[in-house]
Image: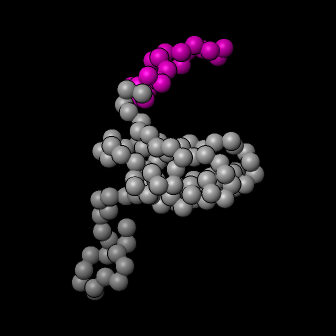
Amino acid sequence: MPLADSAPDAPTFVTVIRTEEKGSDVNLASYLLVDGFKREYEMAVVVSNDSDLAEPIRLVRCELGLPVTVVNPHLDSPHPSYQLQKCASKCMNLWPGSLQACQFPPTLRDAHGVIHKPAGW
Protein backbone atom coordinates (compact mmCIF):
# COMPACT_ATOMS: atom_id res chain seq x y z
CA MET A 1 0.00 0.00 0.00
CA PRO A 2 1.42 3.46 -0.86
CA LEU A 3 2.46 5.57 2.11
CA ALA A 4 0.73 8.95 2.27
CA ASP A 5 2.96 12.03 2.60
CA SER A 6 6.20 10.12 3.07
CA ALA A 7 9.46 11.97 3.69
CA PRO A 8 11.79 12.16 0.65
CA ASP A 9 14.24 9.58 2.05
CA ALA A 10 11.54 7.32 3.60
CA PRO A 11 10.10 4.19 1.99
CA THR A 12 7.17 4.87 -0.31
CA PHE A 13 5.32 1.65 0.50
CA VAL A 14 4.31 -0.10 3.72
CA THR A 15 3.25 -3.63 4.53
CA VAL A 16 -0.33 -3.90 5.81
CA ILE A 17 -0.43 -6.42 8.65
CA ARG A 18 -4.11 -6.27 9.46
CA THR A 19 -6.77 -5.78 6.81
CA GLU A 20 -10.44 -5.21 7.46
CA GLU A 21 -13.45 -5.64 5.30
CA LYS A 22 -15.14 -2.28 4.98
CA GLY A 23 -18.75 -1.60 4.13
CA SER A 24 -20.36 -4.91 5.07
CA ASP A 25 -22.03 -3.40 8.16
CA VAL A 26 -23.35 -0.51 6.05
CA ASN A 27 -24.72 -2.94 3.46
CA LEU A 28 -26.35 -5.10 6.13
CA ALA A 29 -27.90 -2.05 7.80
CA SER A 30 -29.18 -0.71 4.48
CA TYR A 31 -30.91 -3.95 3.49
CA LEU A 32 -32.22 -4.50 7.02
CA LEU A 33 -33.98 -1.13 6.78
CA VAL A 34 -35.04 -1.23 3.12
CA ASP A 35 -36.38 -4.79 3.31
CA GLY A 36 -38.15 -3.89 6.56
CA PHE A 37 -39.82 -0.86 4.99
CA LYS A 38 -40.92 -3.06 2.07
CA ARG A 39 -42.23 -5.65 4.57
CA GLU A 40 -40.16 -8.37 2.95
CA TYR A 41 -39.67 -10.12 6.29
CA GLU A 42 -41.64 -10.66 9.47
CA MET A 43 -38.59 -11.00 11.69
CA ALA A 44 -34.89 -10.35 11.14
CA VAL A 45 -31.94 -12.34 12.45
CA VAL A 46 -28.65 -10.45 12.42
CA VAL A 47 -25.54 -12.60 12.87
CA SER A 48 -23.00 -10.07 14.13
CA ASN A 49 -21.61 -8.52 17.27
CA ASP A 50 -20.90 -5.16 15.62
CA SER A 51 -22.34 -2.36 17.74
CA ASP A 52 -22.46 -0.15 14.62
CA LEU A 53 -25.66 -2.05 13.79
CA ALA A 54 -27.43 -0.92 16.98
CA GLU A 55 -29.13 2.11 15.43
CA PRO A 56 -30.54 0.36 12.33
CA ILE A 57 -31.75 -2.48 14.58
CA ARG A 58 -33.37 0.07 16.90
CA LEU A 59 -35.07 1.77 13.94
CA VAL A 60 -36.44 -1.52 12.61
CA ARG A 61 -37.84 -2.36 16.05
CA CYS A 62 -39.17 1.07 17.04
CA GLU A 63 -40.21 2.59 13.72
CA LEU A 64 -41.29 -0.53 11.84
CA GLY A 65 -42.39 -2.67 14.79
CA LEU A 66 -40.46 -5.70 13.54
CA PRO A 67 -38.56 -8.02 15.90
CA VAL A 68 -34.81 -8.40 15.45
CA THR A 69 -32.79 -11.21 17.02
CA VAL A 70 -29.02 -10.72 17.25
CA VAL A 71 -26.82 -13.82 17.14
CA ASN A 72 -23.25 -13.27 18.34
CA PRO A 73 -20.91 -15.50 16.30
CA HIS A 74 -17.72 -14.50 18.15
CA LEU A 75 -16.45 -17.05 20.64
CA ASP A 76 -13.82 -14.63 21.94
CA SER A 77 -16.56 -12.32 23.25
CA PRO A 78 -19.16 -14.64 24.78
CA HIS A 79 -21.80 -11.92 25.22
CA PRO A 80 -23.45 -9.79 22.56
CA SER A 81 -22.36 -6.16 22.75
CA TYR A 82 -24.16 -4.05 25.30
CA GLN A 83 -25.47 -1.70 22.57
CA LEU A 84 -26.98 -4.64 20.66
CA GLN A 85 -28.50 -6.10 23.81
CA LYS A 86 -30.26 -2.79 24.48
CA CYS A 87 -31.89 -2.53 21.03
CA ALA A 88 -32.50 -6.13 19.89
CA SER A 89 -35.66 -8.09 20.62
CA LYS A 90 -33.52 -11.03 21.64
CA CYS A 91 -29.79 -11.84 21.80
CA MET A 92 -28.09 -15.21 21.71
CA ASN A 93 -24.72 -16.80 21.00
CA LEU A 94 -23.79 -19.11 18.16
CA TRP A 95 -22.01 -21.92 19.96
CA PRO A 96 -19.61 -24.26 18.12
CA GLY A 97 -21.76 -27.29 18.95
CA SER A 98 -24.83 -25.65 17.42
CA LEU A 99 -22.94 -24.77 14.28
CA GLN A 100 -21.53 -28.30 14.06
CA ALA A 101 -25.02 -29.79 14.39
CA CYS A 102 -26.19 -27.74 11.39
CA GLN A 103 -23.49 -29.01 9.04
CA PHE A 104 -24.33 -31.27 6.13
CA PRO A 105 -22.62 -34.65 6.04
CA PRO A 106 -19.22 -34.76 4.28
CA THR A 107 -20.76 -36.29 1.14
CA LEU A 108 -24.15 -35.59 -0.44
CA ARG A 109 -25.77 -36.91 -3.59
CA ASP A 110 -28.23 -35.01 -5.78
CA ALA A 111 -29.62 -35.35 -9.31
CA HIS A 112 -26.32 -34.05 -10.74
CA GLY A 113 -23.95 -36.32 -8.83
CA VAL A 114 -21.93 -36.39 -5.61
CA ILE A 115 -21.00 -33.28 -3.65
CA HIS A 116 -18.04 -33.35 -1.27
CA LYS A 117 -17.49 -30.93 1.60
CA PRO A 118 -14.11 -29.19 1.27
CA ALA A 119 -11.48 -30.55 3.66
CA GLY A 120 -11.02 -27.16 5.37
CA TRP A 121 -14.64 -27.06 6.55
| Residue 17 lies in quadrant | bottom left
Q: Nearer the viewer, residue 11 or 76?
A: 76
Q: Magenta includes 67? A: no
Where is residue 76? Give x, y as percent.
30, 45
Q: Nearer the viewer, residue 46 or 86?
A: 86
Q: Residue at x 63, y 42 (%)?
A: 43
Where is residue 59? Give x, y as percent.
61, 59
- Tell me if residue 71 comes above or below residue 34 in the rendering: above
* Quarter of the C terminus within the rendering: top left
Q: Residue at x 36, y 46 (%)?
A: 79
All told, the count of numbered labels is 0
Q: Residue at x 37, y 79 (%)?
A: 4
One can see residue 48 in this view: yes
Where is residue 32? Give x, y as percent.
62, 52
The furthest residue to the left? 9
Where is residue 62? Give x, y as percent.
62, 57
* Quarter of the N terminus within the rendering: bottom left
The furthest residue to the bottom? 8
Q: Residue at x 61, y 53 (%)?
A: 61
One can see residue 21 in this view: no
Color theme of the render: one colour
Q: Is residue 12 left or right of residue 62?
A: left
Q: Magenta includes 108? A: yes
Q: Nearer the viewer, residue 74 or 113?
A: 74
Q: What residue span does the magenta drawing correspond to?
A: 99-121
- Tell me if residue 19 comes above or below residue 69 in the rendering: below
Q: Is residue 41 left or right of residue 13?
A: right
